[in-house]
Image (spheres, helix red, strand yellow):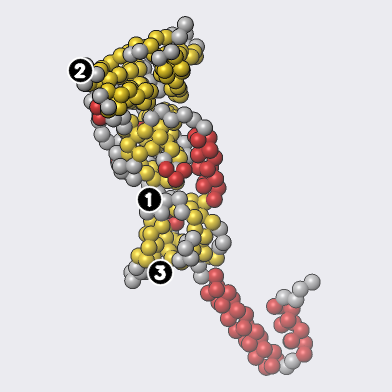
């Protein structure tokens, strides 16, 4: 059984005079106090060896804490660091380049969070793109739809990303971590069918994948057809064919749209096909179908005919009784036909 401090004093008391014992007791108490204080000083910042990843956009990297600290560099979104120690609100980290500095802990996420986003990225990689979107302002990427869900990456204004999914989630007040999403709701005024809002699952370069508020992005088809959106929200767009007119190539396009009504329980309610008219030197509508209840993914392909490749596309729809069905289309010349 280990010897404790009181037991040492009892042994000393039996072997020394009262005066000698008092001096020894004072010496031992002083030594114990010094050891305790030294241990507290050594703890200082809590030492750790855990990995973390930079969340959000570019994060400032400071050489020390305090009013005289200086920004010595920046860490990029998704960059891996090793946490050396922690202080309230701050973490001292070692970057991949070997630089040590201090960052705010709220800009770091754990290995577990990183792994969750990696799983989401692998799942989204298998989904067909529904078109490229332009980020209108800095946008947080969430692990799932919802303002208060975990955030990791942030896309900057002007970036583009592939849209692969759409979901509706209840609108909820933003926490301090997600409050920046509230600013992303500005833009064209949209009515709402309920207290819901629309979220898009996107893939950006560098493997950055996550859910963002649809209000922070716009589908980005070429301007020559985008001008015909007529106030509708484009949910998907595809280049389905290219033709040559007097030595210049012109693409044909398919897009799917919905009314500017937030929280609808489907992905699109109308499709439209645009073809190039060589005689008029402009785009014209070849086919338009309204009042659909449509869902991702729209699949675009091509099949060989006697005249060469012919565009085809396939929709996932729901009928009036709520049954899901698949509807296939093909083109003959500039005309769209439905597979029977």
Q: CA distance from mark 2 to mark 1?
A: 47 Å
Q: Secondary structure at mark 3?
A: loop
Q: Secondary structure at mark 1?
A: loop
Residue at 47%, 29% in the rendered image:
128
Q: Which residue is under mark 3?
A: 64
Mark 3 and mark 2 in contact (Cβ < 8 Å)? no
**Outermost residue toward the right in this view:** 1
Which of the pair 97/88 is nearer the observer?
97
Q: Position of residue 182 (x, y in %)?
A: 32, 39
**Outermost residue toward the left in this view:** 280
User: Is residue 317 in sight in this rendering?
Assistant: no
Q: Which residue is under mark 1?
A: 57
Q: Secondary structure at mark 2?
A: loop
**Residue 295: quarter of image:** top left
Circle nearer the N terminus (2, 3): 3
Mark 3 and mark 1 in contact (Cβ < 8 Å)? no
Which of the pair 88/310 is nearer the observer?
310
User: Is residue 310 in sight in this rendering?
Assistant: yes
Residue at 27%, 20% in the rendered image:
276
Does 199 sit above or below residue 64? above
Residue depth check, mark 2 versus mark 1: number of the one nearer the observer: 2
Q: Position of residue 48 (x, y in %)?
A: 56, 62
- Relative horizontal placement of residue 32, taking residue 160 as reference (left or right): right
Q: Which residue is under mark 2?
A: 280
Residue at 31%, 32% in the rendered image:
220
Q: Position of residue 224 (x, y in %)?
A: 24, 27
Q: Position of residue 176 (x, y in %)?
A: 38, 47
The crowding category of the residue bearing disc 1, from other C-alpha atoms within 10 Å (few below 14, some 14 to 19, many at least 20), is many
């Amino acid at each position: 059984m280990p010897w404790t401090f009181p037991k040492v004093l009892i042994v000393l008391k039996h072997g020394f005079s009262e005066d000698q014992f008092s001096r020894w007791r004072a010496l031992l108490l002083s030594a114990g106090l010094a050891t305790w204080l030294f241990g507290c000083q050594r703890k200082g910042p809590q030492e750790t060896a855990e990995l973390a990843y930079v969340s959000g956009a570019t994060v400032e990297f400071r050489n020390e804490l305090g009013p005289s600290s200086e920004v010595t560099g920046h860490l990029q979104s998704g960059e891996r660091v090793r946490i050396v120690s922690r202080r309230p609100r701050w973490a001292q980290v070692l970057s991949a380049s070997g630089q040590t500095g201090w960052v705010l802990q709220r800009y770091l996420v754990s290995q577990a969070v990183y792994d969750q986003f990696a799983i989401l990225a692998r799942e989204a990689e298998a989904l067909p793109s529904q078109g490229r979107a332009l980020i209108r302002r800095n946008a947080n990427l969430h692990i799932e739809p919802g303002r208060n869900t975990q955030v990791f990456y942030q896309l900057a204004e002007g970036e583009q990303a592939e849209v692969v999914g759409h979901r509706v989630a209840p609108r909820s007040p933003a926490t301090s971590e997600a409050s920046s999403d509230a600013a992303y709701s500005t833009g064209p005024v949209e009515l709402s069918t309920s207290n819901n809002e629309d979220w898009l699952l996107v893939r950006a370069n560098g493997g950055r994948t996550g859910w963002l508020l649809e209000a922070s992005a716009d589908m980005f088809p070429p301007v020559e057809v985008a001008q015909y959106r007529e106030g509708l929200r484009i949910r998907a767009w595809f280049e389905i064919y290219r033709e040559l007119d007097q030595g210049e190539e012109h693409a044909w396009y398919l897009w799917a749209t919905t009314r500017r009504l937030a929280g609808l329980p489907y992905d699109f309610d109308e499709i439209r096909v645009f073809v190039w008219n060589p005689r008029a030197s402009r785009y014209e509508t070849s086919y338009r179908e309204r009042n659909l209840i449509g869902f991702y993914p729209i699949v675009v392909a091509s099949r060989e005919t006697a005249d060469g490749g012919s565009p085809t596309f396939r929709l996932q729809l729901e009928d009036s009784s709520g049954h899901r069905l698949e509807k296939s289309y093909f083109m003959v010349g500039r005309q769209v036909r439905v597979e029977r």
